[in-house]
């Protein structure tokens, strides 16, 4: 069985990478060539004997159940700055960083749907606007949501709010 962040090698192929997402028996891997690929679990083997550039995923923080906060606000902030998602990004290309950020958005959208979270606030910052543009393209594919700029006072224009219409 694999976990997010595991280093894996593809059987019958010369690919290796880090597990990004697991859905049933389908495992999405960030390959050392910078692209994401999805494999069936029986096509992969664990492999601790290689380095994938300097890509090391930060483990998801353990979140304590705080029903008081969840029921009161029913919203979640997600910081998409790359330094919040990986321990080291020195050798990552801009493409690799963007793909990791977009995957984080997809994962959070899926989790919010399952956990019935009403509102997600994606903190993307200002930069050149590439992440925000790509995020907007991705979010427009979802149905039953409203997308708008998050509080300017709080985020200074560097965050987008997604509200689920349930």
Image (cartoon, rainbow, N blue to C red):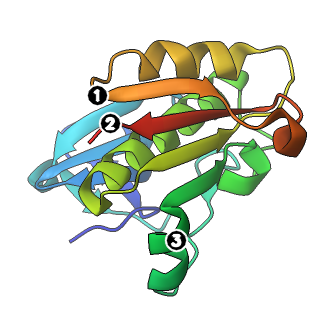
Q: Which of 103 and 10 lies nearest the eye of the viewer?
A: 103
Residue 87 at least partly seen: no
Q: Which of 114 and 52 lies nearest the eye of the viewer?
A: 114
- Estimate the x, y position of residue 48 in percent, counting from the top left: 46, 68
Q: Which quadrant holds the N terminus?
A: bottom left
Do the numbered discs 1 and 2 sit on residues whose CB atoms are within 8 Å?
Answer: yes
- Estimate the x, y position of residue 135 in percent, counting from the top left: 55, 22
> What is the distance, in whole Å, between disc 1 and disc 2 at their CAs?
5 Å
In the picture shown, does residue 35 fall above or below 128? Answer: below
User: Closer to us: mark 3 or mark 1?
Assistant: 3
Circle 3 — which element?
helix
Category of crowding for the residue at label 1, using alpha-carbon neighbours closer than 10 angstroms: few (below 14), some (14–19), many (at least 20): few
In the picture shown, does residue 6 fall above or below 11? Answer: below
Circle 1 — which element?
loop
> What is the distance, in whole Å, between disc 3 and disc 1 at their CAs?
22 Å
Residue 39 at least partly seen: yes
In the image, is 106 to the left or to the right of 162?
left
Q: Which of 14 and 125 lies nearest the eye of the viewer?
A: 125
Instruction: Identify residue for label 3.
Output: 72
Residue drawn at point x = 51 percent, y = 28 percent: 33
> What is the distance, in whole Å, between disc 2 and disc 3 at their CAs?
17 Å
Instruction: Identify residue for label 2.
Output: 165
Category of crowding for the residue at label 2, using alpha-carbon neighbours closer than 10 angstroms: few (below 14), some (14–19), many (at least 20): few
- Estimate the x, y position of residue 54 in percent, counting from the top left: 70, 50
Numbered disc total: 3
Residue drawn at point x = 70 percent, y = 35 percent: 150
Instruction: Please give the label number shown on residue 144.
Output: 1
């Amino acid at each position: 069985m694999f976990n997010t962040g595991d280093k894996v090698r593809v059987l019958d192929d010369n690919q290796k990478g880090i597990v990004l997402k697991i859905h049933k028996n389908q495992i999405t891997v960030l390959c050392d060539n910078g692209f994401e690929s999805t494999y069936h679990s029986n096509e992969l083997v664990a492999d601790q004997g290689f380095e994938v550039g300097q890509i090391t995923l930060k483990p998801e923080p353990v979140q304590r159940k705080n029903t008081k906060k969840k029921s009161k606000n029913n919203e979640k902030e997600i910081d998409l700055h790359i330094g919040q998602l990986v321990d080291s990004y020195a050798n990552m290309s801009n493409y690799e960083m963007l793909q990791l950020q977009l995957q984080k958005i997809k994962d959070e959208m899926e989790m919010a749907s399952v956990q019935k979270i009403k509102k997600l606030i994606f903190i993307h910052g200002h930069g050149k606007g590439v992440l925000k543009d790509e995020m907007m393209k991705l979010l427009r594919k979802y149905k039953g949501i409203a997308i708008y700029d998050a509080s300017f006072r709080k985020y200074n224009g560097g965050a987008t709010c997604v509200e689920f219409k349930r």
